[in-house]
Image (cartoon, rainbow, N blue to C red):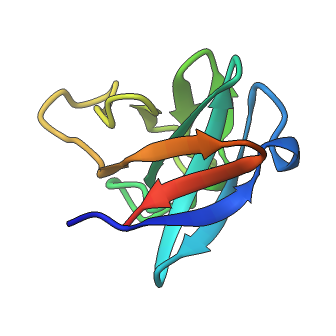
Amino acid sequence: MTELKVALKVSDLAPGSGKTVEVGGNQIAVFNVEGQFHAIDNTCLHRGGPLGEGSLCNSEVTCPWHGWEFNVVTGESVNDPNQKIKVYEVKVEGEDVLIGV
């Protein structure tokens, strides 16, 4: 069963940006896509780059190390459709952004 834990405040993450948070011992990249929050594993499948530090364009994040791109909603790699990164459940309650771990 997934347990939802507070990861950050809504005001901590402006639309069009992302950041890395630690929840339940996991490094998770959280993104604000036009007011909707999404969370994926922070580690790029290509060479382990920190996706939370990548640039966000619409719903795709570009890894800052080697340019691999992932859809933050589905976790699918834009570069290799056979690759998919873990997606976490996200819920907003008031000012809290909760992530399921």
Residue drawn where x is 70% and y is 22% of the image: 35
Residue 44 versus residue 22: which sits nearer the camera? 22
Residue drawn where x is 44% and y is 38% of the image: 68
Residue 40 versus residue 61: which sits nearer the camera? 40
Q: Residue furthest front?
A: 94
Residue 56 versus residue 13: which sits nearer the camera? 13
Residue 14 drawn at (x, y percent): 84, 34
Taking 74 as reference, is 63 above or below it?
below
Residue 84 drawn at (x, y percent): 23, 42
The image quarter containing residue 43 is bottom left
Q: Quadrant of the N terminus?
A: bottom left
Taking 55 as reference, is 47 above or below it?
below
The image quarter containing residue 82 is top left
Q: Residue furthest bottom?
A: 25
Tell me: 79 left or right of 33.
left
Q: Quadrant of the C terminus?
A: bottom left
Residue 2 drawn at (x, y percent): 28, 63
Taking 5 as reference, is 68 above or below it?
above
Residue drawn where x is 41% and y is 28% of the image: 73
- How many marks the image carries: the answer is 0
